[in-house]
Amino acid sequence: ALLDAVPAAIATGVDISEGALAKAAENARDLGLGGRFKALHSNWFEKVSGSYHVIASNPPYIPSREIGNLQDEVRDFDPHRALDGGADGLDPYWVIAAKAAGFLETQGRVAVEIGHTQKNEVSGIFAAAGYVLTGTHRDLGGNDRVLVFERRKP
């Protein structure tokens, strides 16, 4: 969707799951965007190089104890590691906030999908890492769903 919305953009999709990367590459090809998409098998930022204007992530954000309460079609379709964000659902945000700055261009931004009750906690994690919240996008139900951060100016 991001590549389609920004015609000049190129993207690197990063995931620990080779299956997820294959599906993302297939989707990009099916939409005629394959020439602007590269898949990278990596655990978070381990194999990432270069710099980016935007880092967007849909990390696992569901607290471990809530996985069993998910709707069957969600719990049984997605791999467990694609859902489980750790005890409080926030583990991935600590990684992203700590590592993303090393890959951002000047005035680059980080956009992350969140659980509908996580705005304050995720904002706090990024603020502690030197970011400022610059935007919030809501889902169709009116819940805060995507937060956009920029590094604070020194």
Image (cartoon, rainbow, N blue to C red):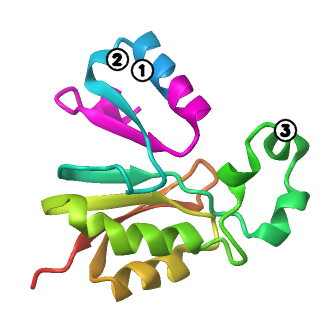
Q: Which residue is mark 2?
A: 34
- How far apart are the alpha carbons under marks 2 and 3? 29 Å
Query: What amino acid is at disc 3?
Result: Glu
The answer to whether mark 1 and mark 2 are in CB contact below 8 A is: yes
Query: Does the magenta portion include 46?
Result: no
Q: Quadrant of the N terminus?
A: top left
Between residues 113 and 136, which one lies in front from this camera angle?
113
Residue corresponding to mark 1: 28
Q: Residue at x 32, y 61 (%)?
A: 110
Tell me residue 91's x, y (percent): 58, 72
Question: Splitting the image into 4 quarters, where does residue 13 fall?
Answer: top left
The structure residue drawn at horizontal position 35% and vertical position 11%, both measured from the top left corner, is 32
Of the two numbered discs 1 and 2 on the same chain, state the one appearing first in sequence: 1
Tell me how far mark 1 sits from mark 2, CA to CA.
Answer: 5 Å
Looking at the rendered structure, the secondary structure element under dot 3 is: helix
Count numbered badges in the picture: 3
User: Residue 12: x percent and y percent?
Assistant: 33, 37
The residue drawn where x is 17% and y is 52% is 51
Is 33 situated left or right of 93 in this image? left
84 lies above or below 32 = below
Q: Which residue is mark 3?
A: 73
Task: Examine the rendering and report whether any part of residue 33 can be seen.
Answer: no
Mark 2 is surrounded, within 10 Å at the Cα level, by few (under 14), some (14 to 19) or many (20 or more) other residues, namely some
For residue 58, above or below residue 109: above
Q: Are marks 2 and 3 in contact (CB under 8 Å)?
A: no
Q: Is residue 119 above or below residue 61?
A: below
Earlier residue among tags 3 and 1: 1
Q: Which residues are magenta?
A: 1-23
